[in-house]
């Protein structure tokens, strides 16, 4: 299936290329023949080779979904939510040979709402990024590149599947951020009855018990005790099943208080927030 960018380009009768690598001579030649003043990069996921960086007359500009130098790297939106950052934003940056290390041309921040998931925050940042790149290109001559403060840099490592496993010994607030950060992918998960149960929506509450213990099941959902506080699971999904309200799941499996979800998956270490 063609990407949304390719579909839009087709509607606008704009040519598209899909090289397997920008290191290929053919791909680099296609960029030279485009005779572009600027090359705009969005969510490409790979470093551009030096030969490509040198092709456009005005260089290459990246739309990065964080307030650089915080959260350089592949997963800035997820990392911002996991860390409990109150704000994030878009940085329009002049690309160089490093990973998101170039000077910032333009940046704007937005608040991370209490219920924001990676999905909802991605949509908000996409709209902001679209507006800022147009502003940046329109005023390129007037923008003053601002070098990044290396001492303040943090790295947004790619999300691993192992990080999605819930450790109920963690504070409820941290697990709630984990649920939001891994929605829509890969989904925060726990073990129940020998199978994986994904948690798509949850809120914190103050009920206490042993980590992983179900302390209540009612119309609001399934309340699970954590290392501190508790989490009310509101929407869950069994392996091979559909996402459904947690209260419906609890009725279907006759879940009762006292059942304990696996408190800490074997071999899994939970990454602490980075501030």
Image (cartoon, grey):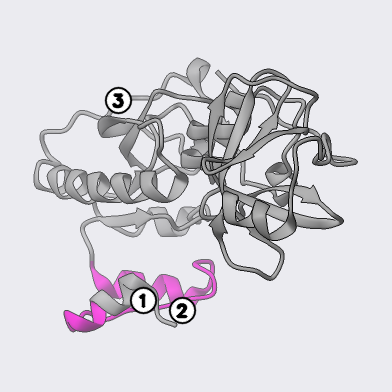
Task: Compare marks 1 and 3 and give the one earlier in the sequence.
Answer: 1
According to the image, label 3 marks what residue? 146
Q: Is residue 127 left or right of residue 222?
A: left
Report which quarter residue 57 is drawn in: bottom left
Bounds of the magenta segment: 9-35
In the picture, the disc for residue 30 is 1
Q: Residue at x 80, y 24 (%)?
A: 210
Residue 225 in the image, given as x and y percentages of width and height:
71, 28
Marks 1/3: CA distance?
A: 31 Å
Task: Compare marks 2 and 3 and give the one earlier in the sequence.
Answer: 2
Q: Secondary structure at mark 2?
A: helix
In the picture, the disc for residue 76 is none
26 magenta-colored: yes
Marks 2/3: CA distance?
A: 34 Å
Residue 74 in the image, given as x and y percentages of width and height:
54, 46
From the image, state whether disc 1 or disc 3 is nearer to you: 3
Crowd band around label 2 with a 10 angstrom C-alpha radius: few (<14), some (14–19), many (20+): few
Marks 1/2: CA distance?
A: 6 Å
Q: Quadrant of the C terminus?
A: top right
Q: Is residue 153 left or right of residue 12?
A: right
Q: Residue at x 68, y 60 (%)?
A: 252
Report whether residue 90 is seen.
yes
According to the image, label 2 marks what residue? 26
Asked whether the residues under the numbered discs 1 and 2 touch, taking CB atoms below 8 Å apart as contact, a structural biologist would say yes
Above or below, 206 relative to 120: above
Q: Secondary structure at mark 1?
A: helix
Q: Secondary structure at mark 3?
A: loop
* 224 and 217: which is toward the camera: 217
Q: Residue at x 22, y 51 (%)?
A: 130
Residue 192 in the image, given as x and y percentages of width and height:
80, 51
């Amino acid at each position: 299936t063609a990407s949304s960018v390719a579909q839009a380009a087709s509607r606008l009768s704009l040519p598209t290329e899909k090289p397997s690598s920008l290191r290929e001579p053919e791909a680099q030649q296609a960029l030279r023949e485009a005779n572009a003043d600027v090359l705009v990069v969005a969510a490409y996921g790979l470093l551009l080779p030096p030969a490509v960086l040198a092709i456009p007359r005005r260089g290459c500009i990246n739309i990065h979904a964080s307030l650089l130098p915080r959260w350089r790297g592949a997963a800035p939106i997820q990392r911002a939510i996991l860390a409990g950052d109150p704000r994030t934003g878009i940085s329009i940056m002049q690309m160089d040979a490093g990973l998101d290390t170039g000077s910032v041309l333009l940046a704007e921040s937005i608040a991370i709402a209490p219920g924001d998931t990676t999905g909802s925050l991605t949509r908000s940042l996409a709209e902001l990024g679209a507006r800022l790149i147009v502003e940046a290109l329109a005023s390129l001559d007037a923008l003053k590149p601002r070098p990044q403060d290396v001492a303040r840099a943090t790295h947004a490592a790619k999300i691993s599947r192992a990080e999605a496993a819930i450790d109920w010994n963690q504070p409820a607030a941290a697990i709630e951020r984990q649920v939001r950060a891994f929605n829509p992918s890969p989904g925060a998960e726990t073990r129940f009855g020998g199978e994986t149960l994904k948690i798509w929506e949850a809120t914190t509450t103050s009920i206490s018990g042993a980590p992983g213990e179900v302390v209540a099941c009612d119309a609001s959902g399934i309340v699970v005790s954590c290392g501190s506080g508790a989490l009310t699971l509101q929407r869950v999904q069994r392996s091979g099943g559909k996402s459904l309200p947690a209260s419906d799941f609890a009725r279907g499996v006759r879940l009762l208080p006292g059942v304990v979800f696996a408190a800490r998956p074997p071999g899994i270490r939970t990454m602490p927030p980075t501030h």
